[in-house]
Image (cartoon, helix red, strand yellow):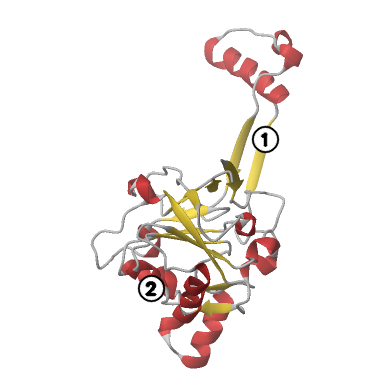
Amino acid sequence: MRIIDLPTPIDASVWEPNPVKHEVVSPAEGGRHMAEGMRERYGLEFDPAELPDGELLSLDTVKLTTHTGTHVDAPSHYGSRAAYGEPQHIDRMPLDWFVRPGMVLDLTDQPVGAAGADVLRREFDRVGRESEPMEIVMLNTGADRIAGTPAYFAKFVGLDAATNLLLDLGVRVIGTDAFSLDAPFTHMIDEFQRAGDRCVLWPAHFVGREREYCQIERLANLDLLPGRTGFTVSCLPVKLVNGGAGWARAVAFVPDE
């Protein structure tokens, strides 16, 4: 069985709408810090030169949002109220939602904006079947190729209320390699100002106020999967208490031929 890595990295050196701050205490600094702490707190003297190369342990401090890098949105991300009851945080979601057979739908030929149900049905025809209950459906938009640039947040295709079609089929986790499952912010606002129709504003997310489901956003490498189906996806989110989202190291398990 092969394992295909599906996340975009968390990288403080690339452009983000909410910049990542990554501070590193080096192993040498860690040794000195430990010695100073022992002296100040416990009155104990220790020379860090006694350690291998004078080094102890490195330490990373990272400041970022839960929507940086590949992450799973919880129902509580979509709003404080839901038609089905209290929207749950990421630490309360059922783990068996996130380790399931996967399906990839190809949206790389779609323009910037929101794809409709007709596009999803076309893709089901190409796959040869509809998605099955609890299958993790992932949208290959090709956006991961521009991840780390400002264009990644403005040039991609999302879904409109066609999200309901997937939920009708029993899907509970929908993924995309784009920044958002909805169309780019600028596209939605332009459409709203042009037509005055609130339905164009975050329709995929706001479906989650009516029906319980999760999104995986900012995936990558979906084009490396050997087929549209026939693999298992694991996208277990970090157990962040009361979090509206949790980072995930998403992978696909592909059986050897």
User: In the rendered image, which residue does mark 2 sit on?
Assistant: 165
For the point 64% across and 15% down, the residue is 35
**Front position in the image: 67 or 165:** 165
**Front position in the image: 47 or 17:** 17
Mark closer to the observer (1, 2):
2
Q: Is residue 209 visible?
A: yes
Q: Position of residue 39 (x, y in %)?
A: 60, 13
Q: Position of residue 76 (x, y in %)?
A: 36, 58
Query: Which residue is farthest bottom?
Result: 195
**Front position in the image: 242 or 238:** 238
Query: Which residue is farthest left?
Result: 85
Q: Residues within 10 Å of mark 2 (few under 14, many from 20)?
A: some
For the point 35% across and 67% down, the residue is 169
Query: Which residue is farthest right?
Result: 53
Report helix, strand or loop for mark 2: helix
Q: Is residue 242 visible?
A: no
**Front position in the image: 247 or 140:** 140
Query: Which residue is farthest front?
Result: 257
Q: Residues within 10 Å of mark 1 (few under 14, many from 20)?
A: few
Q: Please state if 149 lies on the left or on the right of 254 as rendered.
A: right
The kind of residue tagged 1 is Val
For the point 42% across and 68% down, the residue is 130
Q: Position of residue 94 (x, y in %)?
A: 33, 48
The kind of residue tagged 2 is Leu
User: In the rendered image, which residue does mark 1 sit on?
Assistant: 24
The residues bearing labels 1 and 2 have C-alpha atoms spaced at a distance of 45 Å
For the point 41% across and 77% down, the residue is 161
**In the rendered image of this protein, does residue 232 appear above or below residue 24?**
below
